[in-house]
Image: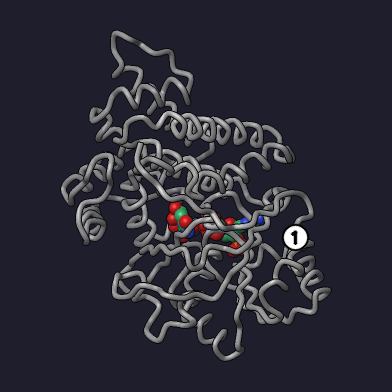
Amino acid sequence: MNSFEYCCPTRILFGKGMESNVGKQVLKYSKKILLHYGGGSIKKTGLYDRIMESLNASGISVVELGGVKPNPRIALVREGIDLCRKEGIDFILAVGGGSVIDSAKAISVGIPYEGDPWDFFDGKATADSAVPIGVILTIPAAGSEASPGCVITNEDGDLKRSMGTELYIPRFSILNPEIAMSLPPEQLAYGATDILSHLMERYFTNVAHVELTDRLIEATMKTVINCVRRILDDYEDFDAWSELMWSGTVAHNGLLDTGRTGDWGSHAIEHELSGIYDIAHGAGLAIVFPAWMQYLYKHDIARFAQFAARVWNVDTDFFSLEETALEGIARLREFFESMGLATKLSGVDIDDTRLEEMARKCTHSGPVGNFVKLDEGAVLNVLKLAL
Ligand code: NZQ
Ligand code: ZN
């Protein structure tokens, strides 16, 4: 087990109706805020009205910036920074999923920074201060509601890049599972795939003696799989949505990293896919992860067999652990397909024309992944297996 430092500073308010507390939470920080949201789902569901009621009751004045797209764009981040400076905003409330939250995070570090915010994503600058943010989460998925990560797309160059800092980790995140029940089934599938992927990125490690976090990750993976099945059976199953939503936060708030080194190669490869083709992050992961596993499971057959047995209930074949390992990968693929997702690039109409470009961009600052380090040629091989 590795030495570690762990701190998750986000206050979580979890449960039905919790968004009615937003005014009081915001008031701890500011009386004038930016309300940042996406393409309009929050207006259709009535969430927007409930939030405004709570903010008004606390006497908070609101400047709005909607229109965040999935795979959030740097152009809107720049617009948000200008707006906040002009209006003297010192707090951002993000209402949405990973895209809205990440857009808010990028604005928050961009406000006090004199240069262009893309500098943080192409490694030219490191943030040293940020405007605080709060979150009302509407989709269990990216885990951005309690993570130091932020992923932004720059259409100039088809680039999707990430940054990480503790400066903008949300001060509070409000999680009401009822809000997620208006999600279309494909967003449920993308979100669950992302949660599972965050768990698998951590699970596949070379660090020994990580039994506690192994078991916690396995339990969270089993919970996600089970809850998705329950929700697909009954979309109104509040308890299943609750477990799924909390799993999404726990999967990515750092707890399950403690003492171990995760991989993250599949995420790096997926970001190239969604950077170029603008597909949903979860849709890309459902394709990349099985291909990544197929490419390198021999690196640690015992770990893949453990994954198969403990997460997918595969009977361990002690005469051929490889068969057990392969059955685990097959069940993961079946699970993605059971949610209606493609597990091959051809299933999302992507052919081989830009594979070399993706492999090159993905490894622009060196090999990706820790479980197995993948150079440009290896990434290309993973992508070819995904065709
Ligand atoms: O924009 P609106 O109209 O709100 O619709 C959204 C959007 O179209 C819709 N939606 C969300 N909640 C809803 C709803 N529709 C109906 N009812 C609701 N309750 O869902 C669509 C997808 O939203 P998005 O925010 O893009 O989803 P997600 O949370 O999956 O975020 C994906 C982004 O997060 C990044 C991804 O790369 C991607 O850009 N990630 C961020 C991470 C982080 N910051 O730590 C880690 C992840 O690995 C990931 O890379
Ligand atoms: Zn992810």
| Rendered position, 59 above or below 44 | below
Q: In x, y percent, where is residue 38?
A: 59, 67
Residue 344 appears in the picture as rendered: no
Residue 284, percent from left and from top: 40, 49
Q: Amino acid at mark 1?
A: Glu
Q: Residue at image x 42%, y 32%? A: 333
How are the colours assigned in the image?
one colour
Question: Is ligand 1 closer than 8 angstroms to the Cβ of mark 1?
Answer: no
Look at the numbered disc 1 and give the secondary structure of its residue: helix
Q: Is residue 30 left or right of residue 316?
A: right
Work out whether 192 lies above or below 50: above
Quarter occupied by the C terminus:
top left
Looking at the image, residue 152 lies above or below residue 185: below
Seen as rendered, the residue at the extreme left is 377
Quarter holding residue 362: bottom left
Q: Which residue is more in the foreground, 108 or 333?
A: 108
Query: Mark 1 — residue?
Result: 19
Q: Relative to 331, is 30 on the left or the right?
A: right
Please, which residue is most extreme toward the bottom here?
86
